[in-house]
Structures are given as structure tokens and as C-alpha cells.
Amino acid sequence: MAKAPLPRKLVAQNRKARHEYFIDETLEAGLVLTGTEVKALRGPGVQIAEAYADPRGGEMWLVNAHIPEYAGGNRLNHEPKRPRKLLLHKKEIEKMIGAVSRQRMTIVPLELYFDERGRAKVLLGLGKGKTKGDKRETIKERDWKRDKARVMRERG
């Protein structure tokens, strides 16, 4: 019998991203990691809250993602906040660069996880920044949905 694929294992999540941006489109990208970074991803302390994707020289880079040093590592341990290359197709990169330059959008990492095959992936969101009023409207809408669900539950 064939093995059942493993479910994806969430490593880090950027919960503020959906509050700060209108996310129009999402895209999955691979990560180029060094040896100790993969082991460090399986431990605690990974943060992508302040990270963003940056196009440089026709390539995409994940900047400001914090992957702590691996405790069992030696002198060849990695730097925690180094830029990491993202693996995307050329057309996807060009599409993202176009959206950033023409439409004033931002590329924000939403999740960092291991897929079914055990490879580290980043879920990127192409988003436009929210204003203070937009954020208030989102909170108001979320509260209304919660109250509506409560009333419907009470009435049966």
C-alpha cells in the first residue's frame, strides 16, 4: 500500500497581514535554505510578521524573516535574518514585479510551512495597504457577523 501524504505542517503565520492589507491574490513559493535552517524551522521562534518579498535582479527574495540559529549547530550555523531566495517561475516573478510597480501593491508572506513532501514553502499574498477607516470597517463587519451568528444560534 502507498503511504498517505502527510498534511502540511504550519511553521509560522503572519496574522497581522490580513488586518494590514487587502489580499487580492496568493501564491506558493519554495525557499532556498542552508543546512541548519531546515532544522531550525522545525523548532520554535520562527517569525515572519515583519517580513516582505523584494524583487532584486529578476529574482524574488524573502527579506526580514527571522529563523533562529539551530541550537545543535556548530560554527557553520546560519545568520537569522539573512535574505532568502524564493523559488518562483519567471512569469510569476514578472507578474508580481508588475503589480508592485504599477499598482503600488506589496508582496507579504502569509504563512511559512512544510508541504506534503516535507519541503519548506511560503504562501505569498499580493496586497494593497488598508487605511485606518478600512481597518475599522473590517472590525465592524467581523463583529456584526459574530453577533448575527449568536442571535441565530439563540433563536434556534
Image (spheres, rainbow, N blue to C red):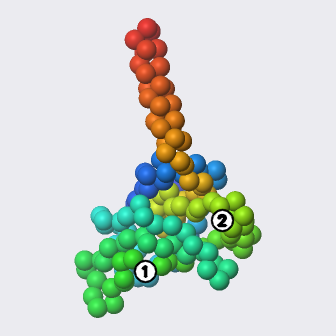
Residue at the (30%, 65%) spot, across then down: 45
Residue highlighted by disc 2: 100
What is the number of callouts on the image? 2
**Residue 101 drawn above or below residue 81:** above
Residue 61 on image: x %, y %? 55, 75
**Residue 66 drawn above or below residue 109:** below
- Dot 1 surroundings within 10 Å: few (below 14), some, or many (20 or more)? some
Left-right relation of 119 to 38: right
Left-right relation of 99 to 115: right
Q: Amino acid at mark 1?
A: Arg
Residue 59 on image: x %, y %? 63, 78
Q: Nearer the viewer, mark 1 or mark 2?
A: 2
Left-right relation of 57 to 77: right
Q: Amino acid at mark 2?
A: Val
Label 2 SS: helix
Residue at the (60%, 54%) spot, across then down: 128
Q: Looking at the image, can residue 123 be seen? A: yes
Residue at the (43%, 51%) spot, across then down: 15
- Dot 2 surroundings within 10 Å: few (below 14), some, or many (20 or more)? some
Q: Looking at the image, can residue 119 be seen? A: no
Cβ–Cβ below 8 Å for labels 1 and 2? no
Label 1 SS: loop
Looking at this view, is 29 or 72 the one in front?
29
On residue 40, the disc is none
On residue 82, the disc is 1
Q: How much space separates mark 1 and mark 2, taking CA atoms?
A: 22 Å
